[in-house]
Amino acid sequence: MLRDERIPADELQRIDEEIRGNWPTGEAIDFEEAIAFHESLPDGKRFADVLEDADRPLLQPRAGVATLDEQISLLEHLQDDGGADLLPTTIDSYTRDNAYEKAKTGLEEARDTGKAALNGFPAVNHGVEGCRDLIRALDAPIEVRHGTPDARLLAAVTFAGGFQSFEGGPISYNIPYCKDDDLEETIEHWQYVDRLAGAYTERGIRINREPFGPLTGTLVPPSIAIAVMLVEGKLAATQGVRSLTLGYGQVGNLVQDVAALRALRNLGNEYLDDAVEVTTVFHEWMGGFPPDEARANGVIGLGGTTAAVAEPDKVITKSPQEFRGVPTKEANAAGLRTTRQMIDMVREQQIVLGGIDEEQELIERTAMELIDTVEAHGDGDVASGVVDAFASGALDVPFAPSDAAEGAVLPARDDDGRVRIFEFADLNVSDDVREIHENFLDERARTEGRDRSFAMVADDVDAISDGKLIGRPDAPDDGANAGDSGGESSAD
Amino acid sequence: MYKEYYHDRPLSLTIVHRTLWVHGRDSHSRCHRVRRTRRRYHHPRTGIRRRRVRGLGVQTSQEEFAEAAKTHDSDAVLVSSLYGHAEQDCQGFQETLAEHDVDAVTYIGGNLAVGQNDFAEIRETFQNMGFDRVFDSETSPEEAIRALERDCKTAERDTERITA
């Protein structure tokens, strides 16, 4: 039965041997030898130390290409021309699906033709030695960033390969990413990943773990995101993780974003074991971006401004080419520099924003109601509790594609652009909290002269890419999408 | 990987809603549900009856598309893909449909290649793979629906509106 309990040593050993057989590169993993490699790395590559000792928000982009040489040159560019403090290695989608054979085909195609045949770095295929070549080639610490429900082999290969930070978690890499992956099984898989990180930690190699805060990336109410972060943090801590970076995705309202980041840090410190060093990461806007790069830079700038006020430990940056997918390395570096410029200018200023404390109090109260619900569903155990809470809808994530969640809760912005809950469905929060959200949405409805309706949700999902924050009705077209539509229908 | 909607009778339309937004390389499949939710509420404006369009969800295999299209005798199959691997994933798609005796219009749309590419080349690639229409990431759902109305004339007869 699934419990939030530490995996015993013999069980860790058994799983370890089993997963190494999943792909030939697994055979090269040797724990003792891997510890020696980590110990040989200079202080500047110790991810947890660099992050926790920083005196300003550190910047990290996303980036991953198929071949080792191109990955090195991409990361060199982001480090040298973008000024990235921390580097990423984003894993391709076939590896995320454990389809290593397809990743192999893509990698071979990329090597043979130079085509971008994969959307990331197939670390399992590159193996332990390939990962170490990457770690050796760069000066900054590098994190594995992905979206893998069963990341056991990926973790085993990349930890042995010298990576000291690993993104994801059983909820945040299942509920927003999958259709039919069983949540209970995903939690068991991540208990292994966290236990392995814990095993390195006990030997003095602190592997930083980073639950993925933005979830579905689309108007996720902060209280829901924070509740998920706390559950994943607790599951990781149980397995011996001691460096945890809890995440949150920008919603675009300055006051709410600052309040949410403060709530995340506060509750993370309160709820998690004192032995855990808690840091926070702020993701620049994860929803739809404007197609126009100039406008996209505006969205990135607001992210930088928010980070300057809230002072998270780390910021994941976006590029102005976000709308069209994987950016060029130059555009990726530009997103880093835009963010750095905003943070460094705004941080010098004493900025006082009204309403942060009240918003933070509401977020914390709601998040803790959801945590109480999770614990109640599991009779005090968050592992079994979170599975049941999602199954019943008592905990839910908007727009979740996974069968493990109801995906019935819906968000909408209030009259100030803060994300509220429009449809609670079975979400287990108090009547008091519901009323607050409903009142805020009613206020917007009055301003717009329309009923509180699903149209608000749909309009809000498009608003930022259309050049606004709030999806107001009948907004005049101001040219946000001017230019060629590029669609098929305009071509015939 | 794929997202799919289909009509049962009488229109028998298999529709995959195309993408509206891009979340970049990190997105994998998490934004697809946004589209499904939107479509449920938006299609009434088009006159296509809601009960004939259903989603198969994210990460749908070629076989699942073909079986659904066969089961519902679909007139059209729409595929959306966001993460750049569509060319690899759609290899042999027309053959898979043919093996299931599916004779349907096929559309594909979204972020169909990794990186910042020339859409004319992408369109040609997918047309050569047998897709009847190829849409870029800036196309509105209404544009794709208008194309369906042209390609599946019977849709125009169907004017029943539903309220969500």
Image (tube, rainbow, N blue to C red):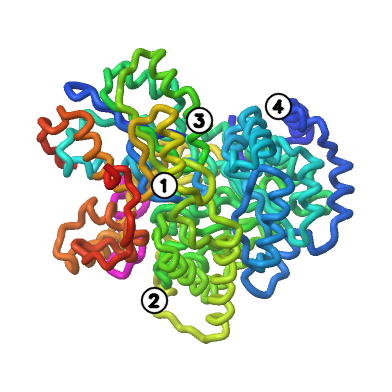
**Local crowd at mark 1 within 10 Å, few (<14), some, or many (≥20)?**
many
Measuring 68% from the left and 61% from the top, which residue is drawn there? A77
x, y percentage for residue A270? 58, 62
The chain identifier of the residue carrying mark 3 reads B
Label 4 vs label 1, nearer the camera: 4
Measuring 22% from the left and 28% from the top, which residue is drawn there? B52
Q: Which residue is mark 1?
A: A397
Residue A84 sits in which quadrant? bottom right
Label 1 vs label 3, nearer the camera: 3
Q: Which residue is mark 2?
A: A355
The answer to whether tags 4 and 1 share a subunit is yes
Residue in front for this viewpoint, A413 or A93: A93
Q: Name the element at disc 1.
A: loop
Residue type of the residue flagged with mark 1: Val
Q: Which residue is mark 3?
A: B89
Residue type of the residue flagged with mark 4: Asn
**Local crowd at mark 4 within 10 Å, few (<14), some, or many (≥20)?**
few
Residue A256 covered by magenta stretch: no
Q: Which residue is mark 4?
A: A22
Q: Which residues are magenta?
A: A414-433
State the CA–CA distance, disc 2 to disc 1. 26 Å
x, y percentage for residue B112? 46, 41
Residue in front for this viewpoint, A460 or B81: B81
Label 2 vs label 3, nearer the camera: 3
Label 3 vs label 4, nearer the camera: 3
Q: Is residue A283 left or right of residue A444?
A: right
Q: Earlier in the sequence, mark 4 or mark 1?
A: 4
Residue type of the residue flagged with mark 2: Gly
The chain identifier of the residue carrying mark 4 reads A
Residue A269 sits in which quadrant? bottom right
**Local crowd at mark 3 within 10 Å, few (<14), some, or many (≥20)?**
some
Q: Is residue B135 left or right of residue A377?
A: left
